[in-house]
Amino acid sequence: MTTSRPDDSLVIDNIGLLLTNDPMCGAGELGALRDAAVVIADGRVAWVGPSTHVPEGSAHHRFDAGGGCVLPGFVDSHGHLVFAGDRSEEFAARMSGTKYGAGGIRTTVAATRAASDDELGQHMADLVREARSTGTTTLESKSGYGLTTHDETRSLRVAGVYADTTTFLGAHVVPAEFAKDPDAYVELVCTEMLDACAPHAEWIDVFIERGAFDADQARTILQAGINQGLKPRVHANQLGEGPGVQVAVEVGAASADHVTHLSDNDLELLAGSDTVATLLPGAEFSTRSPYPDARRLLAAGATVALATDCNPGTSFTTSMPFCIALAVRDMHMTPDEAVLAATRGGAAALRRTDVGHLGVGARADLQLLAAPSHVHLAYRPGVQLVEALWKDGVRLI
């Protein structure tokens, strides 16, 4: 529901615990404030502080948070939301012992090519509504299930309607029709397909993995995208150690995503660069694979993000709270670290400074939990906790 316009001023007060993610606003990295208030004006955060000190006449409307916890909306920096078809049988087979490989992507490619634009759009709209219901206010979405010039372009057009930012992933896997000549497909991605897709995307991505693309192919594709004005990000080191992290850092990628298997050199590269390590625990959950070592990354000083990797094959979830719970339970992150990774970390992975925090001037993207603290996101897994949600100052829930 929508109860305000972005140009309306609003004070949210009686906040039991406010997490601003801005150490200048409150205690610790979470910038935490007790008994707090937020003033929103023109879709931005205009003031934060104690409820007893709200500036006189600063807002036209008041919302009582009822003592609940308010924190920034989640920034989901890795999603594959434009697709058709169902792979539940593949999931069931994996749960029965079949090992995961990259080939299942081609099943979704066939279904996506057969779907209409309206069908793809309706399905993505449904997924975005799901994501909003669990606190996500910023979404990235990739192409990658069309793998023809026509289907990749229309996928990005659909994604652009619903996502905050879009990524061209023509280099997801080599489609079946190019199986005997993958270099020809790389050439297609770098020329005709890229020319058609670049106007509809901000980013370019490559799946660097056995069964997908090698380092040399990835460098060629990423550089072609950079030459067209796209910014790089990379699927790296999901199924085993490999060159993905090295390529990501080499090209200045905003993020290296998955990074489940890291050598000591990979760790040093990430810690010494501004490439964010984006962890996708939904994929490990859905494939029964080892989880990334978040503790090792954090100890090394790498910037860590959490994202859903929503896709039909290996992580069919839109829930950032679910990923937070996995990160705390199975990747040994603290609740504070996991929430920071799901907000400020995701913003860093998208090179955004206006979301992921609630400092003055930030976009008024925030959520109210029906809980006294953010710890409940992991403490009460699977429970719907979002009581209210604002994006750019407009209430959506």
Image (spheres, grey):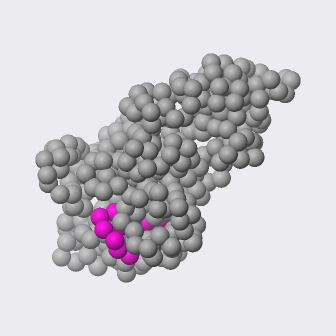
Residue at (60%, 46%) from the top-left corner? 356
Please, which residue is most extreme toward the right here?
56
Say whether residue 104 is left or right of residue 360.
left
Residue 78: x percent and y percent?
44, 53
Q: Is residue 254 visible?
A: no
Which quadrant holds residue 188? bottom left
Say whether residue 181 is left or right of residue 348.
left
Residue at (60%, 39%) from the top-left corner? 72
The answer to whether 305 is drawn above or below residue 377 in the figure is: below
Say whether residue 382 is left or right of residue 68.
left
The answer to whether 350 is drawn above or below residue 164 in the figure is: below
Q: Is residue 65 visible?
A: yes
236 in magenta: yes
Which quadrant holds residue 214? bottom left
Residue 99: x percent and y percent?
17, 57
Foreground residue among 184 and 24 = 24
Foreground residue among 242 and 114 = 242
Residue 87: x percent and y percent?
21, 46
Say whether residue 17 is left or right of residue 216.
right
Residue 308: x percent and y percent?
41, 47
303 in magenta: no
How many numbered badges does the structure rendering display?
0
The stretch in magenta equals 232-243
Please, which residue is most extreme toward the bottom here?
216
Residue at (77%, 21%) from the top-left corner? 60
